[in-house]
């Protein structure tokens, strides 16, 4: 089948093309899907499985020569290696049909033996296991010309945002793999090489409605959205551009536009980056800093350990990390993240247990509503605390001064707790009255802020993050980490056997003494007085207003 965004010169789909029958068989037999019910026709069933398995099952069910259920029943699995994020391929060996089914026997048996191994997965992984390719029913050795054609087809499909799956088969020789052969995946006792490449299948999984708008709102709110996927880098980049996650150029696209090589394009010329999973293990600290400094980031061909490493590296720079995921492989990253968000409908039980929050409708756009609600709660909480502090501090300070210093109290405790205070404030250009309840009735007035509505419709999503991460905050964090590492080295001893530092646990007395001595060090006050862009509940301006009001009350009392 052809896609809606294919070019005009792309050949139309035809089952008579080379390898199509084998691809349909691989799509049907190398599958782990389940159905919600079996008493309705295949076309009316809901398939329980991921999007890739579902698409392949629909494709095979449409073009199989026989009924889908009968075809699966005739060829039960003898051996199977499920797909995992490390191998990025799935293998299955179906049982040949009974001898009474002559037509199926003719379709599935071959001159070498009764068994055939089918494999599907990431194209580069599957091709690495192949030595031949299927052309018009004949096995041809893989040449440089074929590899070039393979790369062109692969890049064409991936550049359109399609998920590309490669299919291959191996006609197992009967003398080595008889019907009663005991396959084992623990010790690698199964065919893993000398396969015959059959073809490529691409599936288009369009983004859900509202994702593009959600990313725009999150970007406006100062939240950086990153894509971490197992797809090919070109597929990931194409999807990221569809949802406006990537708007600028990467080094590869800028080099193509300007006619330069990638090596000639500097990092500061681009605002987007696509990182291949194979490169993550070799990245150094300064390279991670360079990646996270970009505004648009995509990680492709990643494994579960890569996802966990990405979360750790982002947190090390001071970022508050939220992770969305639905699979078992996402559980470590969901657990490590500051906010793990699992999917309710498609999510696995493991991911739900590891997450802090479950998204009921599986829609990424719903996270925007969560961010807005969280910011509204914090804003109302801040107003409530500010109101309480500015109102209570001027009334409490005179009572403290009365206890500490011989200053007569302007208001007695009973008056503060029970009686309402009619207070007149004089300003240079304005004069107005403000009826305030005292501490006895303060709770009701403070709680009323919880029901405040946002001042504007989109004002909450235009606010900056409360703890922004910038170059200054990153450098400050690194300075503190370097100081801690020096302290650890200073309190460690050399291990003569391993020839390295060995950390010595300090006693409680030494720990207490260190905390008591900290306020007398320069580093303590530098850290305490260091300027940050973090938002605070109560700042000095607010406290100075409360102190001024306390002074007015004291002046009246005296």
Image: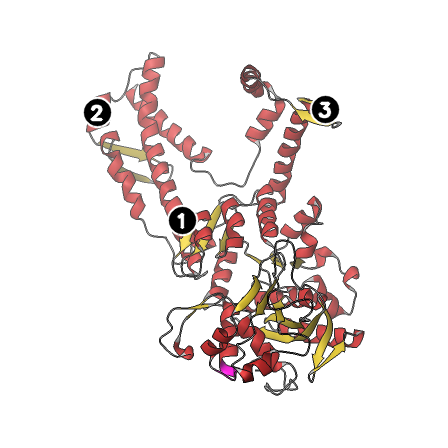
Q: Earlier in the sequence, mark 3 or mark 1?
A: 1
Does the rendering let one see residue 350? yes
Front residue of this view, candidates 475 and 329:
329
Judged by depth in the image, the label closer to the viewer, 2 or 3, is 3
Q: Quadrant of residue 494?
A: top right
Residue labelled with disc 2: 415
Q: Is residue 64 magenta?
A: yes
How far, Cα to Cα, is label 2 from label 3? Answer: 69 Å
Q: Is residue 536 above or below residue 363?
A: above
Mark identifier at residue 465: none
How far, Cα to Cα, is label 2 from label 1? Answer: 38 Å
Residue 24: percent from left, percent from top? 57, 78
Q: How is the image coloured?
A: secondary structure
- Residue stretch rendered in magenta on the structure: 62-66
Q: Residue furthest top?
A: 406
Residue labelled with disc 3: 495
Q: Earlier in the sequence, mark 2 or mark 1?
A: 1
Residue 49: percent from left, percent from top? 47, 65
Q: Is residue 229 magenta?
A: no
Along the horizontal axis of the image, is 518 left or right of 170?
Answer: left
Along the horizontal axis of the image, is 495 left or right of 410?
Answer: right
Residue labelled with disc 1: 374
Q: Earlier in the sequence, mark 2 or mark 3?
A: 2
Judged by depth in the image, the label closer to the viewer, 2 or 1, is 1
């Amino acid at each position: 089948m052809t896609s809606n965004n294919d070019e005009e010169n792309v050949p139309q789909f035809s089952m008579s093309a080379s390898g199509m029958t084998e691809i349909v068989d691989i799509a049907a037999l190398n599958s782990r899907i389940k159905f919600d019910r079996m008493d309705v026709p295949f076309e009316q069933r809901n398939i329980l499985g991921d999007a890739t398995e579902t698409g392949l099952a629909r494709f095979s069910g449409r073009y199989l020569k026989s009924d889908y259920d009968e075809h699966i029943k005739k060829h039960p699995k003898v051996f199977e290696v499920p797909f995992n994020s490390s191998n990025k391929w799935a293998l299955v060996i179906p049982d040949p049909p009974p001898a009474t089914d002559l037509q199926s026997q003719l379709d599935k048996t071959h001159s070498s033996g009764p068994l055939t191994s089918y494999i599907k997965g990431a194209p580069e992984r599957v091709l690495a296991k192949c030595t031949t390719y299927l052309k018009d029913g004949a096995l041809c050795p893989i040449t440089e010309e074929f590899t070039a054609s393979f790369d062109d087809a692969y890049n064409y499909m991936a550049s359109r945002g399609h998920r590309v799956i490669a299919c291959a088969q191996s006609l197992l020789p009967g003398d080595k793999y008889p019907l009663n052969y005991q396959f084992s995946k623990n010790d690698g006792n199964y065919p893993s090489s000398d396969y015959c490449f059959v073809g490529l299948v691409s599936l288009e999984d369009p983004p859900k409605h509202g994702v593009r708008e959600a990313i725009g709102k999150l970007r406006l709110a100062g939240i950086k959205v990153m894509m971490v996927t197992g797809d090919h880098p070109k597929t990931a980049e194409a999807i990221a551009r569809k949802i406006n996650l990537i708007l600028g150029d990467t080094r590869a696209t800028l080099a193509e536009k300007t006619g330069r090589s990638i090596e000639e394009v500097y990092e500061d010329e681009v605002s987007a980056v696509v990182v291949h999973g194979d490169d993550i293990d070799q990245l150094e600290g300064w390279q991670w800093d360079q990646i996270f400094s970009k505004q648009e980031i995509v990680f492709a061909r990643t494994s579960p350990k890569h996802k966990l490493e990405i979360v750790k590296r982002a947190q090390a720079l001071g970022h508050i990390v939220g992770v969305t995921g639905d699979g078992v492989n996402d559980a470590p990253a969901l657990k490590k993240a500051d906010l793990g968000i699992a999917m309710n409908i498609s999510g696995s039980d493991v991911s739900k247990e590891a997450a802090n929050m479950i998204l009921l409708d599986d829609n990424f756009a719903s996270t925007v509503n969560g961010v807005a609600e969280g910011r509204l709660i914090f804003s109302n909480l801040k107003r409530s605390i500010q109101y309480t502090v500015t109102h209570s501090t001027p009334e409490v300070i005179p009572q403290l001064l009365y206890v500490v210093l011989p200053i007569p109290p302007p208001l007695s405790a009973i008056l503060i707790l029970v009686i309402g205070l009619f207070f007149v404030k004089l300003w240079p250009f304005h004069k107005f009255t403000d009826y305030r309840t005292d501490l006895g009735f303060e709770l009701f007035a403070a709680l009323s802020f919880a029901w405040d509505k946002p001042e504007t419709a989109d004002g909450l999503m235009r606010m900056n993050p409360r703890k922004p991460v910038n170059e200054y905050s990153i450098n400050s964090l690194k300075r503190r980490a370097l100081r801690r590492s020096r302290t650890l080295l200073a309190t460690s001893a050399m291990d003569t056997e391993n020839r390295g530092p060995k950390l010595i646990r300090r006693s409680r007395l030494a720990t207490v003494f260190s905390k008591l001595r900290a306020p007398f060090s320069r580093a303590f006050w530098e850290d305490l007085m260091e300027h940050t862009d973090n938002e605070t509940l109560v700042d000095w301006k607010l406290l100075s207003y409360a102190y001024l009001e306390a002074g007015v009350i004291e002046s009246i009392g005296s």
